[in-house]
Image (cartoon, grey):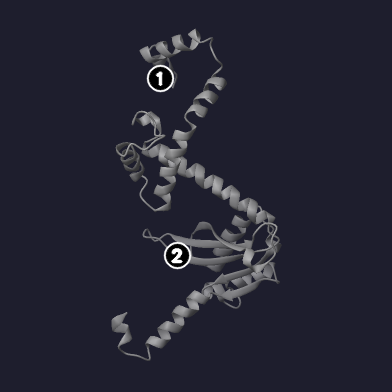
Amino acid sequence: MKSAIRKHRKSKEHVWAATKHYSKGGKLVKTHAKEFISRNRHKVITLMKLAYFNAKEDLANRNYEGLCGLAYSLNVLEMPIQHVYSSYTNMMAGKEFIFCISKYLDDLQKQKLLQSPYYAFMVDETTDRSEEKHLIIYFSFLAPKCTCCSAIEITFAKLLTVLDGCAHTKFDAIMKMIKEVGLNKHQLIGIATDGDSSMLGCHDGLVAIIKGEMPHLMSVHCIAHRGALAALDAIKCFPCLPYID
């Protein structure tokens, strides 16, 4: 707001900073910012490491400030001089760090995928505590410049929100994701799903719909889901086992 700028211009801090700025020859803002970033680079990296640890351990974002406080109490090197809001030790700064790291990892994944001649999906559905439906998708692809089986990489792709569990809804969400990532849909050669009818239904299942677009697609009934079904059937033969379970 302009009123906030006018108020700031009259403040003692601004007058002091401007006086110091002009006494040094009046550097350009870009030059000053570049020097400031370079001088504080290692401190920002330390804070980004804390934010990354917070996200990797699946901790609440509000814990980021507590981690920063712990680092100060342990006298960790390369921390900002003051533990104040403007030193990137607040919750909002932690959130921004996580978004930046996420964007970087997402771009890195896209580069790898686009270099692979083929790719496959592993798809499963879930419902969160708010009863919102999601599709979790993993990519399986060949590492760049490699064609041997040992170079296959499996990595988390997306958690897609879907309105319902219908096969056509899932199909539209997956096709939209493929387009956003920039992949060629004809390079999709495999998909692994559970045995639900919305996935493996002969006529209206997700796999059947995708095969309508890509007849070469190979589908696999997930070995983990098959194992769970086999264990469930085996338990029925031994009455004592359900009590243990």
Q: Kindly tell me whether residue 39 is visible in this rendering.
A: yes
30 or 187, nearer to the observer:
30
Please identify the quarter of the rendering in which residue 117 is found: bottom right
First reached walking from the N terminus: tag 2 or tag 1: 1
Quadrant of the rendering where the C terminus is positioned: bottom left
Residue 193, above or below 109: below
**Residue depicted at x 55% and y 49%:** 105
Q: Residues within 10 Å of mark 2 (few under 14, many from 20)?
A: few
37 or 119, nearer to the observer:
37
**Callout 2: SS:** strand
**Residue 59 horizontal side relative to residue 136, left or right:** left
146 or 160, nearer to the observer:
146
What kind of residue is marked 2?
A: Thr
Q: Residues within 10 Å of mark 1 (few under 14, many from 20)?
A: few
* Residue linked to disc 2: 126
Residue 59, above or below 15: below
Q: Residue 22: x and y, percent? A: 50, 9
**Residue depicted at x 42% and y 49%:** 55
Q: Residue 4, labelled with which disc? A: 1
Please identify the quarter of the rendering in which residue 221 is found: bottom right
Q: Kindly tell me whether residue 179 is visible in this rendering.
A: no
